Image (spheres, coloured by chain):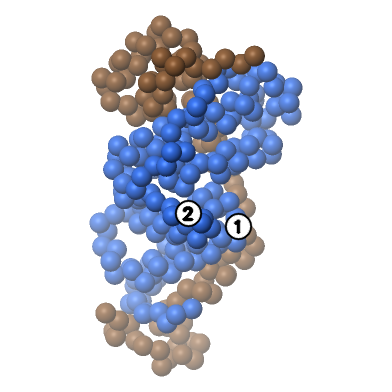
């Protein structure tokens, strides 16, 4: 690890408290972004190291929560960028980020919540998110899973509110399409626990 | 055999995806609701997008176990306070006052 510039004690104590408070939820966010526990842990460590180095730039302009999520999400996107052979940009959507070519129209089988959250269903949900591009995945996870508002999500990602809405819509439709094939009433027996 | 959404309804896709949690401008919301009154296919879409969002939110409430000793590994890599450095025999480390 490179040499660190120490912060004054009050800031350090505040930072330690932030690590304790935010590590679990940031780790889970990074795990959903990266789908790999070791990558998520590495990204979490980098997140807190970068946050510590830049504590002096955090002046309460944003909430501590959105500030840390911004660093963590950027860290996850850098990890994803390193995995890819093609450049990864959050600025523009790729052709793969459009609407699904076909929208399957079937009523889904209604299952009790516990059945919906079976291990098999969880795997289907995770795999569907993993199929999203990083640009769509980041918006969906921040908005629908982490529960940030549209404005907060835009602030975290450094994109416009309209861009968040467009990406959120595309992400939800793509996920719905993936789940439609799983919950299609034609496949009820297969989907039942 | 499963049906698919008619081409004529595809212009409503983004609006439907945002409608499920009220994140839609008032004018567009009214226009969409008028369309939904007459279109059972788009009502199915609204219902299943809503279920999709519900499922992910429900799944997010399920705890994900943290890796064993994550906190210890995390703090081992994070910088120490001046007091901790002194206690660990590293009193020669730069002081806080020297920090920019």
- Would residue B12 be visible to someone looking at this image? yes
For mark 1, does the 10 Å Cα neighbourhood hold few (<14), some (14 to 19), or many (20 or more) residues? some
Asked which quadrant contains residue B97, the reply is: bottom left
Q: Which residue is drawn at 50% across and 32% down?
A: A174
Instruction: Report the front residue among B94 and B4.
Output: B4
Q: Under tag 2, what secondary structure?
A: loop
Do discs 2 and 1 share a chain?
yes
Q: Residue at x 32, y 54 (%)?
A: A63
Residue of label 1: A37
- Which residue ends up furthest to the top in the rendered image? B38
Q: The brown chain is which one?
A: B
Q: Under tag 1, what secondary structure?
A: helix
Sequence order check, earlier mark of 2 and 1: 1
Host chain of mark 2: A
Q: From the viewer's perspective, is residue B42 above or below residue A140?
A: above
Give how far across and how far down residue B62 sits, in percent: 59, 42
In this picture, residue A186 sits left or right of residue A177: right
Report how many numbered discs are placed on residues in the image: 2
Q: In which quarter of the image is the C terminus of chain A?
A: top right
Q: From the viewer's perspective, is residue B57 above or below residue A90?
A: above
Give how far across and how far down residue B10 sits, in percent: 42, 20
Asked which quadrant contains residue B60, the reply is: top right
Identify the mark at residue A171; answer none if there is no mark.
none
Q: From the viewer's perspective, is residue A55 above or below residue A177?
A: below
Q: Which shade of the palette goes to chain A? A: blue
Closest to the camera, between mark 2 and mark 1, is 2
Instruction: Report the front residue among A119 and B34.
Output: B34
Give how far across and how far down residue A36 sits, in percent: 60, 55
Instruction: Report the front residue among A52 and A14.
Output: A52
Residue of label 2: A86
For mark 2, does the 10 Å Cα neighbourhood hold few (<14), some (14 to 19), or many (20 or more) residues? few
């Amino acid at each position: 690890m490179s040499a660190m510039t120490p912060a004054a004690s009050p800031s350090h104590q505040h930072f330690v408290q932030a690590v304790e408070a935010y590590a679990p939820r940031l780790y889970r966010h990074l795990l959903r972004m990266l789908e790999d526990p070791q990558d998520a842990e590495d990204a979490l460590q980098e997140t807190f190291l970068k946050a510590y180095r830049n504590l002096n730039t955090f002046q309460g302009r944003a909430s501590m929560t959105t500030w840390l999520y911004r660093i963590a999400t950027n860290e996850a996107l850098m990890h994803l960028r390193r995995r890819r052979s093609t450049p990864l940009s959050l600025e523009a959507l790729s052709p793969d980020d459009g609407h699904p070519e076909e929208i399957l129209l079937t009523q889904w089988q209604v299952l009790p919540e516990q059945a919906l959250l079976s291990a098999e269903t969880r795997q289907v949900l995770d795999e569907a998110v993993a199929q999203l591009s990083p640009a769509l995945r980041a918006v969906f996870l921040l908005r629908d899973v982490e529960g940030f508002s549209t404005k907060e999500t835009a602030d975290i990602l450094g994109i416009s509110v309209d861009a968040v809405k467009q990406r959120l819509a595309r992400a939800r439709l793509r996920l719905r399409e993936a789940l439609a094939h799983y919950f299609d009433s034609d496949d009820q027996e297969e989907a039942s626990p | 055999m499963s049906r698919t959404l008619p081409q004529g309804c595809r212009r409503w896709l983004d609006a439907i995806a945002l409608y499920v949690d009220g994140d839609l401008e008032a004018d567009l919301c009214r226009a969409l609701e008028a369309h939904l009154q007459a279109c059972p296919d788009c009502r199915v879409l609204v219902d299943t997008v809503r279920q999709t969002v519900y499922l992910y939110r429900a799944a997010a409430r399920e705890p994900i176990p943290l890796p064993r000793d994550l906190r210890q590994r995390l703090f081992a890599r994070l910088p120490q306070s001046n007091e901790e450095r002194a206690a660990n025999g590293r009193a020669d480390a730069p002081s806080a006052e020297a920090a920019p």
